[in-house]
Amino acid sequence: MVNGLKLECSFSKWYPTFEKNSLEATILQVPDDVSKYLEHDEFVLPVEATKSLPENAQWMDGAPVTGENEETEHQPTFPEFSQKIQNVLDEYGAVFVKTNWSSPADATWVAPTKTLKCNTLEEIYLLLKSSDRTARDINAVKSLRDHKNPLPFCLVLKQWQDINPCTEFRCFVVDNELIAISQRDISQYHSSNESEKYNIQTDIKSLFSERIKGRFPLRSYSFDVVRRKKDKVKIIDFGLMDESSAKSTLFTYEELQNHIDDTPEFRFIGEEIGIQPRPPMHFCVPREISEFFQSGDNATLLDIIQREVESQRKEDDGATADNSEST
């Protein structure tokens, strides 16, 4: 285990085995220079990701974001890797992004859509560059360089699909037995879970017994699935069976450890519970950015940055004028 992450749960490890039973995805090995760029504190997008931005766009410090016709001494460029990403974008139309273990869900506040849906290179690099979860995955991969089976750092691009939260479930396996199934979105009541509870349980049990059991290398683990209709269940991801994976479900880790008598037990919210907070809203967003986002004008991060730069310029111009008058 590396920093709480299991090699077997890395997307690049399990996906080749379960590809036919999973949501479609493309895995790209990330070159070392791109990994180093993502780790670096300086916030600047690669040349390829800024070609479609406004001609005079600037960052908070006044430095140009773009400069297609100018020499950009400090602006990185990864033409081959960026082209691979663009090829996937051209094929899928829009993508969901993640790395070996994690999605950059902590950085969705910087995205124009405020989600993990990406339509451009700019949006992909912006999410990855802004995410602490991505940095954690990079560090985990780096710590394995001297391991007998080193793991490459990977970018996973899944074809974007609008998934109804009521169709997602987290499942827990202990000693190779499916013991628990939980509604994934625990923020609200979904009537379909109650009306379809027996079919949901049956379909997930069938997927596990026919496609997963004995093929995934760990004996105890969790996995997420989406069930859009009867007999159509797809794997989303695999993870550990620990406190973290149980935290956002209707089971406690203690319950899962002590085994459940009538397995697999399926838990779902059985009645309206009012408005509940959604987990992504708990990620830290800088106060100033949050205030801008709450202005209600659907501004993108780039719009916000440009406004702030313009505001600072006006303040600087005013200060310069005051100094001139005083002299």
Image: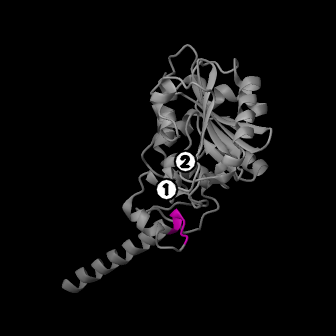
Mark 2 or mark 1: whose residue is earlier in sequence: 2
Q: Which residue is depicted at the point 62% across and 27% down?
A: 263
Q: Residue at x 53, y 23 (%)?
A: 259
- What residue sits right under mark 2 in the picture? 186
Q: Is residue 300 magenta?
A: yes
The amino acid pointed to by label 1 is Gln
- What x and y, as percent, mark residue 202? 74, 33
- Examine the rendered structure and indicate whether residue 313 appears above or below residue 22: below
Q: Nearer the viewer, residue 196 or 169?
A: 196
Residue 32 coordinates in the image, percent (x, y): 56, 33
Marks 2 and 1, how far apart in space? 8 Å
Residue 276 marker:
1
Q: Residue furthest left?
A: 327
In percent of the image, x 75 and y 25: which residue is there?
211
Q: Is residue 56 left or right of residue 195?
A: left
Q: Quadrant of residue 66?
A: bottom right
Q: Is residue 287 above or below residue 93?
A: below
Crowding at mark 2 (Cα within 10 Å: few <14, some 14-19, many 20+): many
Residue 278 against residue 151 in the figure, above or below: below
Q: Which residues are magenta?
A: 298-303
In this view of the protein, which residue sits in the foreground, 307 or 202?
Answer: 202
- Judge whether residue 74 can be spotted in this image: no
| Residue at 70%, 21% in the rendered image | 213
> Which amino acid type corresponds to the residue marked 2 in the rendered image?
Ile
Res. 94 in view? yes
As helix, strand or loop, the secondary structure at mark 1 comes to loop
Q: Is 34 covered by the magenta stretch? A: no
Q: Could you tell me if the residues under marks 2 and 1 are in contact, i.e. CB atoms within 8 Å?
A: yes
